[in-house]
Amino acid sequence: MKQPLIAAALAAFLFTSCSEAKQETSATETESHEHHEGMAHGDEMPASNSLVVEAPDYTAVAAPVKEQIAAVLDSFLKLKDDLVASDAQQAQDEAKTLLAAAEKVDAAGLAGEQKAFAEERIAEVKQSASKMAEAADLAVQRGQLELLSEATFALTKAFGASTATLFYQHCPMANNNQGAYWLSADGEIRNPYFGESMLECGSIEEVFN
């Protein structure tokens, strides 16, 4: 008689434990989902005066420098798309192309503050592109994206190297939840820090026309 009672008690204990575990798992999943849902999503435009990256106005410079920086921007945007697609090999190859484009920017014809600004920002582009070109790991490549984005955006704005609308976007969960920016020519959020896993996580923080 005792054995059936013990078996019944054990079954009841296991059922209760299992139910509690399921409830805890469900609560954790709900919390995780709500945390992600609380992040910024979508393509809402920022205030018209929103400014994240400041840049001087050197748009009166001669065409060659503009064209050279435009080539840097073009290669950068392709690289960013490779990171959105989580294609480490293609990103590595495009980083080499970007590095070559940056090497061709000739600041020798500039003077004073224009030259100093161009050389500083081009050095940052080269630094980030070089590290990405040497890396086959997506995490390493993505770790260089924010500095590369800022430098490319600042150069493009300062020297008027693009006639297209550009969007400076932000993901609050990148960089271990410290947040990180990226530059895009697409008003739709396509997150290069997480790719498909959080494709639409982010917000537009600055628009440059």
Image: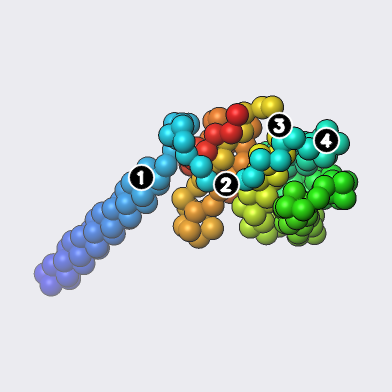
- Using a 10 Å C-alpha cutoff, classify the residue at mark 2 as few (fewer than 14 neighbours), some (14 to 19) or many (20 or more): few
Alpha-carbon span between mark 1 and mark 2: 26 Å
| Numbered disc in front, either 2 or 4 | 4
> For mark 1, what is the residue?
38
Q: Which residue is at a point 46% across and 32% down the rendered structure image?
A: 48
Residue type, label 1: Gly
Residue type, label 3: Ser
> For mark 2, what is the residue?
53
Q: Disc 3 or 1, which lies upstream in sequence?
A: 1
Q: Which residue is at a point 52% across and 46% down the rendered structure image?
A: 52
- Front residue (pair 36, 117): 117
Residue 64 is tagged as: none
> For mark 4, what is the residue?
62
Q: Disc 1 or 2, which lies upstream in sequence?
A: 1
Figure check: 159 above or below 209: below
Residue 162 is tagged as: 3
| Numbered disc in front, either 3 or 4 | 4
